[in-house]
Amino acid sequence: MLLKPKCQNGLITKCIFINNEWHVSVSGKVFPVYNPATGEQICEVQEADKADVDKAVQAARLAFSLGSVWRRMDASERGKLLAKLADLVERDSVYLATIESLNSGKPFLPTLFVDLQGTIKTLRYFAGYADKIHGTSIPMDGEYLTFTRYEPIGVCGQIIPWNFPLMMAAWKLAPALACGNTVVLKPSEETPLTCLYVAALVKEAGFPPGVVNILPGFGPTAGAAIASHMGIDKVAFTGSTEVGKLIQEAAGRSNLKRVTLEMGGKNPNIIFADADLDLAVEQAHQGVFFNAGQCCTAGSRIYVEEPIYDEFVRRSVERAKRRIVGSPFDPTTEQGPQISREHQNRVLEYIQSGIQEGAKLECGGKALGLKGFFIEPTVFSDVRDDMRIAKEEIFGPVQQIMKFKTVEEAIERANNSDYGLTAAVFTTDINKAMTVSTAMQAGTVWVNCFNALSTQCPFGGYKMSGNGRELGESGLKEYLEIKTITMKTVTKNS
Amino acid sequence: VLQSASGSPGTFSGAGGEGCVHVTYLLETYFVLFINNQWQDAESGKTFPTINPATGEVICQVAEADENDVNKAVKAASDAFRLGSPWRRMDASHRGLLLNRLADAIERDAAYLAELETLDNGKPYAVAYSVDLPNVVKCLRYYAGWADKWEGKTIPIDGDYFCYTRHEPVGVCGQIIPWNFPLLMQAWKLGPALATGNTVVMKVAEQTPLTALYVASLIKEVGFPEGVVNILPGMGPTAGAAIARHMDVDKVAFTGSTEVGHLIQQASGSSNLKRVTLELGGKSPNIVLSDANMEDAVEQSHFALFFNQGQCCCAGSRTYVQADIYDEFVERSVERAKRRVVGDPFDMKTEQGPQVDQEQFNKILGYISSGKREGAKLMCGGGVAADRGYFIQPTVFGDVQDNMTIAREEIFGPVMQIFKFKTLEEVLTRANDSKYGLAAAVFTKDIDKANYVSSGLRAGTVWINCYDVFGAQAPFGGYKASGVGRELGQYGLENYTEVKTVFTCCLHEAPSDVITR
């Protein structure tokens, strides 16, 4: 692999990836990338801006032109390339997990066993779909032979967040490439490193130049350039609802590019008195604290039925106090740092608001340690629905526990949100399970479990949590344009 | 030289000669039954010889399964299918992963498998290596991808019920495969059956058992649980029949002659009503219109008939040529047939190897005689092509009439029948006038004619300006006596699926204005 010396340092690549080549930024700018466990800088990465986005879009357009290698490739061959990429990610999974942990603060072992496996499985799943995207032949009125072709949309802009950098890259690349699109992907400025490593694997796997282009950079510059680019046919964004709205506006103002959004959540977790309490406490704990609370799926509103409320709070607090916060590379660590100083401050500010608005701080509440951006696992009880900590997405290790009396009340309060990403219900009663799960205005509902995600299952939000679905067969739809072809025939027969 | 095997590995060497593949392999190959991931002799101790059709010589002895062995295999497959078994509890995506690993292992050993296939079946090595093997790998990879994508539905029925379907495996699947594409037929059967979670008892053709048995060792190597795949070399009337009438086999899939297809379906009816899918014979019409590209049509039509020594269920064995181009077409086809290189399958120049065995050899020569007797015009060939092995000269009959034996019955050999026709309506009627309906083709530049003919032909596959184009993604199967059901594509999954509908009563705990259905 021929790289300019300034592009590579050991396993870390720091340049912009366009046309299977490594580029420095047009402006010459670079930006720092940090280790959130220590606050120290890891390296500097080339900073893509509008001019680099233009270059990438040009490469992606060319790779998508009629008659190109990518357009003329057998669908099964696209699948084979994705499967090869999965094999390479698997080969280098320890390196990737290490870089991911270093750059994002996620504990190393869960990263290796959850993030890496999720990444590999997603690539393999969509590899298998590439030659199974069927149009239909249609019994139309009149003397016609009519069928549909499911074509790729074209050049897809993809903007991904910092909470699951590698896995989010796979969730975006896999369906887009399986369907035959070309991609301009901007990883988060917080966590570009694993995505750039994957770029090298994309080249090694044998994807033609221009099919995948990776541009590390900032939202307001590179991200905005993608969202408003006249040469991009579709944008897929995962991140905050606030920015999601900007993306949608930009698409409307520019060329009406197709938009899919995966955004925030304030997800209700409803625990009935007949639930298996040990299971419910542990799942609710992991549901909100996993990934240091930095999950769009976090169960950050826990509604507990009155009879078991006190016991549930007691056990949750005891569990939170036991949660091990420490270095991501310590195998006993359950919780690493928050992603940045800015983010840490925001979470601490929410905690203050909780205290001020009268919620009961059961444990935690403060920053932890002198270096890095750690926060103590924090539990609030006696939370009221109108408090900020009950309405707004905190994205940190802060658990809110509320009390409820009846099923109707729980359903109504759970649905009373502009968000609608996930929900959960814990009960051993089949009727409560069916009633509540069907009533939830949420894209994923868990019964007696939490954060159970798999590449075969569509995932996405109701209301302001998102538009469209990722994963599963549904994930393909967003990357296809349907063309109906109607041919005159001389005599029709059934 | 192969040694007869009894649980011990065999070795062999490829044929020599100028321009030939000349290799001696030492890969462990077992020539006995494969049950529960173990190699074992037949209970009776019987063996049968498998023959190299290029020379007529015995390659080796192979264990011969009969009813008792079938019973053992079915028991192993049933155990592997029981509720709670490793195979039943496996993630669907993991079944896919195992199929992908099998594809990888076959790809790794492709050269060996192609040699073994050529030795046992007689097809040219160049074709076995560049056509059969890659398509085996692609088929397995295709179905590997389906394993975790074969979804049921949730259904909005009337009433307060939650209703969904589960796509479950059928259970123990008997699979009986032919000798014309031994490895490929094995992949076509295993792919969908294993992707959907079934267990398999497979009887391979007695003419060509060797490559399937090698694949069995790869199945074990890549990690399929024991009992999931069981492979039995043996005869149709004994082992095959035992599978077809077995009370504990839930489904039988058969590829072979229409004559035996009838027996399989009857056996299902008289035993336990096991689900039946059949891929049988054909007498496929290949229609060449006067506006076709002549050179292309001649070459494709030649290929359509003569490929694989004429031993294709979908062979284009009735070539209908429009009157104005008939003479030129026949002349060019004869010239092409005379140029067809018949020889040692290991010679890279060879286009046509021997027929698979003495029985086929005799039958084909019998059909050629009948053609001559009934008044068809023998344009070239018609005789034996070598003094050992089962080689037949590429043969072309012109002026064939629809009522002749060679026009109606499946010859399964290198014998081409050319007919003359005038109009489109006429040829469509004549093409459909057959008990078969496997495939068909039309050669024309005119889009309207192409659409008219392709929608009118009663055949499971219609090729337009091409022939014998296959893809793991595209369903294949017969109308009428050519078969029941479709293989390949998504459609191929249906035969291996039992649909269960689940209804759950929803007693709502809250007033209905809060609930959305």
Image: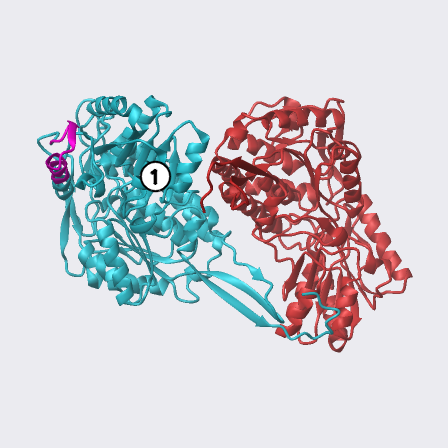
Chain colours: A red, B cyan
A108 is higher (above) or lower (below) than B375: below
Inspect this view and state whether residue B26 appears.
no
Q: Which residue is at a point 76% across and 62% down the rendered structure image?
A: A415
In this view, the residue farthest toward the right is: A356
Q: Which residue is at a point 84% across and 57% down the rendered structure image?
A: A351
In the foreground, A99 or B510: B510
In the foreground, A144 or A454: A144
Q: Is residue B446 left or right of residue A361?
A: left
Q: Chain of mark 1?
A: B
Q: Is residue A201 left or right of residue A158?
A: left
In the foreground, B20 or B421: B421
Picture quadrant of residue A289: bottom right
**Rendering coords of residue A425 (x, y %):** 68, 67
What quarter of the picture does the N terminus of chain B occupy? top left
Q: Does the magenta-highlighted stretch encompass residue B150? A: no
Q: Does the magenta-highlighted stretch encompass residue B377? A: yes
B212 is higher (above) or lower (below) than B344: below
Which residue bears the numbered disc 1? B428
Q: Is residue B148 left or right of residue A358?
A: left
Q: Which residue is at a point 61% across and 45% down the rendered structure image?
A: A477
In the foreground, A25 or B464: B464
How many labels were placed on the picture? 1
A416 is higher (above) or lower (below) than B472: below
In this view, the residue farthest toward the left is: B387
Picture quadrant of residue A393: bottom right
**Rendering coords of residue A209 (x, y %):** 57, 26
Q: Specify few, some or many for label 1: CA neighbours under 10 Å numbering under 14, 14-19, or 20 or more.
A: some
**Rendering coords of residue A300 (x, y %):** 75, 59
Inspect this view and state whether residue A449 appears.
yes
- Disc 1 is placed on an element classified as helix
For the record, the magenta segment spans B366-383
